[in-house]
Image (cartoon, coloured by chain):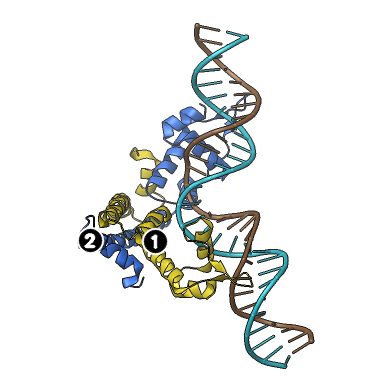
Chain colours: A blue, B yellow, C cyan, D brown
Amino acid sequence: MNIGQAAAQSGVPAKTIRYYEDIGLVAPASRRGNNYRDYAEEDVAVLRFLKRARSLGFSVEDCRGLLSLYRDRQRASADVKALARSRVAEIDRKIAELESMRATLLDLIERCHGDARPDCPILEDLAGSAAS
Amino acid sequence: MNIGQAAAQSGVPAKTIRYYEDIGLVAPASRRGNNYRDYAEEDVAVLRFLKRARSLGFSVEDCRGLLSLYRDRQRASADVKALARSRVAEIDRKIAELESMRATLLDLIERCHGDARPDCPILEDLAGSAAS
DNA sequence: ATGGGGTTTCCAGCAACTGGAAGGTCAAGA
DNA sequence: TCTTGACCTTCCAGTTGCTGGAAACCCCAT
């Protein structure tokens, strides 16, 4: 199957598939006579794996590790679990950061009357009423 | 004051200040005889404004708008409030996305025994037990 | 043969910096 | 006076993870 089909079946855009090949995340696809890349079901499975892992927020580098664990029949599930846990920790950090931004913004929004007048607590805050 | 001082007083790294000047986010600093940039208190205030706005997650483009509102004595606070609200909406979207990743990961983590054996629900999931 | 889809390569660009190289400047100490 | 080190200047490259586009080739149907 050529790259368009593989893209359709995996949900990973053709451009991205080539990119993954480029950075060595997936092995170079075999080529057919016309120099078109040729994909088998297995390749598509790997692409789907990547799509899912990326959608869970794993970085491309993480994916490299996950893929090699995936292929390693001797792997310890503990290693996978550790990767997932550190991913969760990272997510928690990001959520906390966003929550804090959100709280600050909501507070400012509430204090801003939001009409045609120019005075605005939001700008006042940005301008330095509080240190960052 | 030269750029190092401005950086120290605003919390914005010198490199970033130059970058902001480059992309036209701040006006080019005046220069002294030795071609060093020269900053006044006001410039530092603007940098602090930017630092704070960035720390609340406003994009550089948003900052452009915020700065022009900041400088506009005729502004309507409603415009600022609208910017802040759309920022909150964006944050909410991101938080929701992260929460969903987190829930999925925690579920997988819980189901993974995490020892020396190779079988692992996390990898099984990635490998396609569920569609993305 | 011609048209419309594939596909190939490569190059550029997005956000928002950050690092580093190569060189000019300045103040202090030996 | 010379040197050393800490500044400053510019410019170019790299980061993350793609995405868009150009120019060219390939394949199939009409």
Q: Residue at x 47, y 27 (%)?
A: A5
Q: Residue at x 34, y 70 (%)?
A: A128
Q: Nearer the viewer, residue C10 or D12?
A: D12
Label 2 and label 1: CA atoms lie apart by 20 Å
Q: Residue at x 53, y 62 (%)?
A: B28
Quarter-of-image position of residue D1: bottom right
Amino acid bearing label 2: Cys
Left or right of A116 in this view: D5: right
Residue A10 image position (x, y, % from top left): 43, 34
Q: Residue at x 31, y 67 (%)?
A: A125
**Pointer 1: what residue?**
B54
- Please name which of the two marks, 2 or 1, marks the residue nearer to the observer: 2
Quarter-of-image position of residue A27: top right
**Picture layout, residue A45 above or below residue B103:** above
Q: Say which chain tag 2 marks.
A: A
**Picture layout, residue A85 above or below residue A28:** below
Crowding at dot 2, Cα within 10 Å, few <14 / some 14-19 / many 20+, comes out as some
**Pointer 2: what residue?**
A112
Amino acid bearing label 1: Arg
